[in-house]
Image (cartoon, coloured by chain):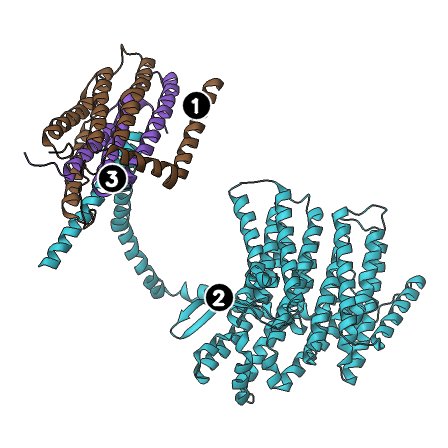
Chain colours: A brown, B purple, C cyan
């Protein structure tokens, strides 16, 4: 069995990922939920690797697994951890919470229905991309052609936006904020 | 156990997406909301990469889109953290309920 | 170049409307308060209009009529179009209109500087331009009627610009009411004609009275020229034109319009409002051609007006009143030219009169404006041109004179004499009353005068090169008038002719006749009705009781049913707003949640509908 259709890899990782995602929301301490989120990002990177895109997996782990938690940790450090997350808001009714959970259920059901019934989203000549056929070199080639030929303008645009925002943030910082 | 099909991966992405949405709506901590938004993006990325791997073999357009999404998501997080820093220095609270004064 | 302009000829019409909307909405939302922006916008719009018209005119020799029409109103097979029909007459009229309004706006930039709310003035000037241009370029009579009404409404607004002052608002009301007669006549004529064609021609597309089909329509009407219906239609059109152009029985409104500001008067008397009647007559020439008597009536109306109003003008002491009467008289001459089927002369005289009359009005002294040597000299120049001694006025008058029969030509010479007489007299009267002050005129005002004189000279040059005319009797009679007035003035010997003076001073008592008869009859009638009501209905008890019963019933219903409904609705709205207030908490998460719930609902509804549809198809 290939990696992409191997249930022994898939089921434990998927269950761990969903569990960590739920725990991220349910943890009271923000540091714990951050750790759970790191686990989710790493697992997502693993799935990218399983799906055949090593490049995406590396970037996912580098950005979401390392850089983003560092930034978030910095953000958490601003806050006063000792009295953080006071157990206030008890007067708030949890109606909204249950409503949202119910809506999420309906949403999941709706999407599942759509996925199972609509053959439109899958082409007639539906073919699995087997790992034998897609070696990593081919993927890198396609990446190169995608970024530098097909989507070169989008790539440039994203880089320009990134630069502008980075420059804007530093300028804001120098002026002493809004 | 049977073989893993495209649907499994799609459901995984869907689950992450829904967790993200629920977390971004329910949770009160700002950082938690930001993490949940990243969850949403990650779920979408999983869907993109799944479709690219299964249905778009020689081109892999979905990989590149996912790449862009990652870059934009990380950047959005940086900006959001900065805004959070400003708001926190003003309000002295990380509870998102206190930020909403229209 | 020309093709671009011809394709986008509707810009001429839309530019003033855009500028009007920009100014009014911009001020309404207080977006900008810069006056220079408003001035430059208005000037730009009218200048562009003049430029477009002029360039189309120069390239127009091929005779192609560009038409842009869209269906506007549709009842079965009866379609009224809205759009643009630009032929040479309309383009000349529009060119004169935009040129004069450009110059007038240039003048009013300095004239209205101190005025409060002058943005409204400029916006209305633009709307005036738009409505007049729409009238000129209208492809059928229905659109003509639409813009005809718009012109009278905008003139009402402009004459009553200082609505705080009582006499001004009264004057604007009177102008509007008298104009209503013409509007009613026009719509009656249009409906009669349209209905007639719809029932008898067998071609419903003709019933929209498009100007492009005018020849076809007149050939159809040719069989009915002896019927009274045809004469009624023609009479209604002539009445409408006569009211708008201030002709014989209706010329009283133009004297009331003198309450307007100087730039408004200059615009109103020259190229905009009064030109509409002349333009309508020129457009309806194929109709009038069918029966010679209608043309004779038009000519007769024109000459009678010219004589009467010239006589009236020669005894007035208010300069604006003199100019108003002279406007009526000159328009009478245009009517005369149309009656003689001398259209070119009529159009040429219209253009010349527009430039000259706006020059005369702009040079007049006013409360805000003093009378200096520049103004005096320019006024004399304008007077010379108006009496047919100089530049464009001379050429146009001689063009009219050539087509007249002997009786009319004698009267025409007399009119030329009187015209020269009153215009010189009023110049002397003004300089005597207001005195000549040694002040320099404003630069923009001077520019506008010079532009107007330039336009006159250009028109003269054009007429001289393109049409043949010779200097004939009217010129000499006007010259004698100037000499006579000068001699009389030096000897200080103006005397009042016994019978003629009171007649002409009061405008042949026409205004008093209207107030004395029609208004009095109306008052009597309303008084009679009031007496019926107070005398009969209020004293007759069963009638009163009958009137009271429904009131009681409705009172009961109101107390017991409607009040409760209102209270219930108020309560419901209150609770709704309470819920809404809760929802509008400003919490981003809440909004997110609403969005998510709504998206999910829509999605599930769609899916359910899809399933139901599938089961329906499957079953």
Q: Which residue is mark 3?
A: B52
What percent of the width, then of the height, locates residue C443?
Answer: 77, 47
In this rendering, the answer to whether A85 lies above or below C367 is above
Chain where mark 1 sits: A
What percent of the width, then of the height, locates residue B26?
Answer: 23, 27
In the rendered image, the quadrant that contains the C terminus of chain C is bottom left
What percent of the width, then of the height, locates residue C492?
Answer: 92, 62
Q: Which residue is mark 1?
A: A169
Q: Are marks 3 and 1 on the same chain?
A: no
In this rendering, the answer to whether C14 lies above or below B62 is below
Nearer to us of marks 1 and 2 is: 1
Q: Secondary structure at mark 2?
A: helix
- Marks 1 and 2 sit apart, C-alpha to C-alpha, by 84 Å
Q: Residue at point 54% right, 75% down?
A: C212
Whether residue C410 is visible, yes or no, is yes
Nearer to us of marks 3 and 1 is: 3
Mark drawn on residue C531 = 2
What percent of the width, then of the height, locates residue C279?
Answer: 63, 71
In this view, the residue in front, C414 or A97, is: A97
Q: Is residue B21 left or right of residue C223?
A: left
Q: Secondary structure at mark 3?
A: helix
Number of other residues with Cα within 10 Å of mark 2, as a class: few under 14, some 14 to 19, many 20 or more: few
The answer to whether the residue labelled 2 contacts the one labelled 3, judged by CB atoms less than 8 Å apart, is no
In terms of image quadrants, where is residue B71?
top left
In this view, the residue in front, B88 or B33, is: B33
Chain where mark 3 sits: B
In this view, the residue in front, C129 or C556, is: C129
The answer to whether the residue labelled 3 contacts the one labelled 1, judged by CB atoms less than 8 Å apart, is no
């Amino acid at each position: 069995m290939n990696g992409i259709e191997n249930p022994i890899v898939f089921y434990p990782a998927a269950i761990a990922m969903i569990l960590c995602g739920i725990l991220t929301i349910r943890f009271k301490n923000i540091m714990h939920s951050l750790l759970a989120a790191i686990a989710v990002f790493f697992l997502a990177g693993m799935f990218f690797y399983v799906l055949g895109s090593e490049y995406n997996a590396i970037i996912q782990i580098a950005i979401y697994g390392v850089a983003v938690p560092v930034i978030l940790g910095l953000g958490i450090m601003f806050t006063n951890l000792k009295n953080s997350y006071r157990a206030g808001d008890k007067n708030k009714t949890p109606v909204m919470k249950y409503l949202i959970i119910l809506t999420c259920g309906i949403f999941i059901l709706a999407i599942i229905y759509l996925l199972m019934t609509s053959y439109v989203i899958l082409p007639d000549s539906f073919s699995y991309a087997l790992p034998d056929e897609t070696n990593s070199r081919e993927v890198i080639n396609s990446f190169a052609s995608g970024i530098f030929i097909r989507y070169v303008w989008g790539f440039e645009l994203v880089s320009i936006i990134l630069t502008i925002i980075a420059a804007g943030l530093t300028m804001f910082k120098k002026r002493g904020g809004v | 156990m049977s073989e893993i099909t495209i649907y499994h991966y799609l459901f995984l992405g869907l689950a992450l997406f829904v967790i993200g949405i629920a977390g971004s709506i329910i949770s009160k901590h700002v950082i938690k909301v930001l993490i949940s938004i990243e969850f949403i993006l990650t779920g979408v990325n999983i869907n993109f990469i799944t479709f690219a791997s299964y249905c778009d073999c020689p081109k892999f357009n979905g990989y590149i889109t996912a790449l862009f999404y990652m870059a934009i998501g990380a950047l959005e997080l940086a900006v959001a953290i900065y805004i959070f820093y400003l708001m926190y220095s003003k309000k002295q609270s990380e509870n998102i309920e206190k930020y909403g004064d229209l | 170049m020309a093709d671009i302009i011809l394709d986008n000829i509707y810009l001429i019409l839309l530019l003033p409307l855009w500028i009007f909307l920009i100014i009014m909405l911009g001020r309404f939302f207080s977006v900008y308060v810069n006056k220079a922006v408003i001035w430059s916008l208005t000037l730009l719009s009218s200048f562009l209009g003049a430029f477009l018209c002029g360039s189309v005119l120069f390239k127009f020799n091929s005779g192609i009529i560009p038409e842009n029409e869209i269906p506007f109103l549709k009842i079965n097979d009866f379609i009224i179009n809205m759009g643009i029909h630009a032929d040479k007459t309309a383009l000349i009229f529009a060119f004169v209109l935009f040129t004069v309004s450009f110059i007038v706006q240039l003048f009013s930039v300095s004239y209205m500087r101190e005025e409060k709310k002058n943005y409204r003035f400029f916006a209305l000037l633009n709307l005036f331009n738009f409505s007049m241009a729409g009238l000129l370029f209208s492809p059928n009579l229905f659109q003509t009627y639409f813009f005809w009404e718009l012109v009278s409404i905008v003139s009402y607004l402009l004459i009553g610009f200082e609505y705080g002052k009582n006499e001004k608002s009264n004057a604007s009301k009177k102008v509007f009411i008298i104009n209503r007669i013409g509007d009613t006549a026009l719509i009656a004529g249009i409906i009669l004609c349209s209905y007639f064609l719809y029932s008898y021609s067998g071609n419903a597309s003709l019933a929209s009275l498009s100007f492009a089909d005018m020849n076809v329509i007149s050939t159809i009407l040719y069989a009915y020229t002896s019927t009274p219906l045809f004469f009624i239609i023609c009479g209604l059109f002539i009445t409408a034109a006569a009211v708008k152009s201030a002709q014989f029985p209706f010329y009283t409104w133009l004297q009331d319009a003198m309450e307007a500001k100087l730039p408004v008067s200059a615009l109103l008397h020259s190229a905009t409002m009064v030109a509409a009647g002349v333009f309508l007559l020129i457009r309806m020439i194929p109709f009038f051609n069918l029966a010679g008597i209608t043309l004779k009536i038009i000519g007769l109306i024109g000459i009678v007006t010219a004589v009467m109003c010239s006589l009236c003008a020669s005894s007035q002491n208010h300069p604006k009143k003199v100019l108003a009467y002279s406007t009526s008289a000159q328009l009478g001459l245009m009517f005369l030219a149309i009656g003689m089927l001398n259209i070119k002369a009529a159009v040429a005289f219209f253009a010349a009169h527009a430039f000259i009359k706006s020059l005369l009005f702009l040079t007049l002294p006013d409360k805000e404006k003093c009378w200096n040597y520049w103004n005096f000299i320019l006024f004399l120049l304008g007077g010379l041109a108006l009496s047919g001694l100089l530049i464009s006025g001379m050429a146009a008058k001689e063009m009219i004179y050539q087509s007249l029969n002997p009786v009319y030509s004698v009267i025409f010479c007399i009119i030329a004499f009187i015209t020269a007489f009153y215009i010189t007299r009023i110049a002397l009267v003004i300089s005597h009353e207001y005195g000549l002050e040694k002040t320099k005129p404003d630069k923009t005002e001077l520019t506008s005068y010079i532009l107007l004189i330039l336009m006159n000279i250009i028109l003269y040059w054009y007429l001289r090169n393109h049409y043949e005319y010779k200097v004939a009797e009217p010129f000499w009679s006007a010259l004698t008038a100037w000499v006579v007035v000068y001699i009389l003035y030096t000897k200080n010997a103006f005397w009042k002719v016994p019978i003629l003076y009171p007649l002409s001073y009061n405008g042949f008592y026409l205004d008093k006749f209207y107030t004395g008869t029609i208004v009095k009859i109306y008052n009597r009638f309303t008084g009679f009705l009031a007496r019926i009501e107070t005398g009969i209905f209020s004293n007759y008890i069963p009638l009163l009781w009958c009137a009271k019963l429904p009131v009681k019933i409705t009172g009961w219903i109101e107390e017991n049913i409607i009040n409760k409904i209102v209270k219930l609705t108020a309560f419901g709205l209150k609770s709704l707003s309470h819920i809404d207030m809760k929802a509008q908490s400003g919490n981003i998460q809440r909004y997110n949640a609403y969005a998510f719930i709504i998206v999910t609902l829509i999605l599930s509804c769609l899916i359910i509908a899809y399933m139901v549809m599938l089961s329906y198809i499957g079953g």
